[in-house]
Image: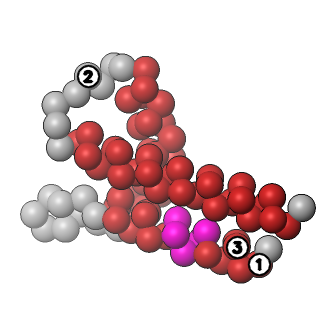
Amino acid sequence: MGLFLRFVISNVFDILQVLILIRVFISWVPHDTNGKLIILLYSVTESILRPIRDNIPLVSNGFDITPVIAFFLIGFIKKLLLFAV
């Protein structure tokens, strides 16, 4: 059971990190914001990014660092959970 739980935790957190990376890359190119996959991507990642964005102000030049912070927080939480299992 412990091995399966480690596998699930690791993969779920890896998928979340990949989704955040995809969102960052998509933000650099023009895309259809009404596409089903884009809406799904934004809904999943926004639930992670919004609390961070609410607590950390934008850098003076308008650069949004919340995906970077979220990426590292997800990795840290993943390591904590895997250590606890």
Could you give the CA–CA distance between mark 1 and mark 3, rounded to whole angstroms?
5 Å
Q: Give the amino acid type for the residue marked by disc 1 in the picture.
A: Ala
Q: Which mark is residue 9?
A: none
Q: Quadrant of the N terminus?
A: bottom right
Residue 31 appears left or right of 5: left
Residue 2 appears left or right of 75: right
Report which residue position mark 1 lands on. 84
Please report whichever mark, 2 or 1, sits nearer to the chain's N-terminal start: 2
Number of numbered discs visible in the structure rendering: 3
Q: Are the residues flagged by discs 2 and 1 in contact, CB closer than 8 Å?
A: no
Image quarter for residue 78?
bottom right
Q: Give the amino acid type for the residue marked by disc 2 in the picture.
A: Asp
Local packing at callout 3 (Cα closer than 10 Å; few below 14, some 14-19, many 20+) is: some
Q: Give the amino acid type for the residue marked by disc 3 in the picture.
A: Leu
Report which residue position mark 2 lands on. 32
Please tell me which residue is depicted at 51% across the width and 52% down the height of the picture. Answer: 16
Q: Are the residues flagged by discs 1 and 3 in contact, CB closer than 8 Å?
A: yes
Please tell me which residue is depicted at 18% across the width and 60% down the height of the picture. Answer: 63
Q: Please identify, in this view, whether the residue under mark 2 or under mark 3 is nearer the observer.
A: 3
Could you give the CA–CA distance between mark 2 and mark 3, rounded to whole angstroms?
37 Å
Q: Nearer the viewer, residue 64 or 56?
A: 64
Could you give the CA–CA distance between mark 2 and mark 1, rounded to whole angstroms?
41 Å
Q: Secondary structure at mark 3?
A: helix
Q: Secondary structure at mark 1?
A: helix
State whether residue 51 is above or below residue 82.
above
Local packing at callout 2 (Cα closer than 10 Å; few below 14, some 14-19, many 20+) is: few
The percent coordinates of residue 37 (x first, y second) are 43, 26
Q: Which mark is residue 82?
A: 3
Q: Nearer the viewer, residue 3 or 59?
A: 3
The percent coordinates of residue 62 (x first, y second) are 15, 58
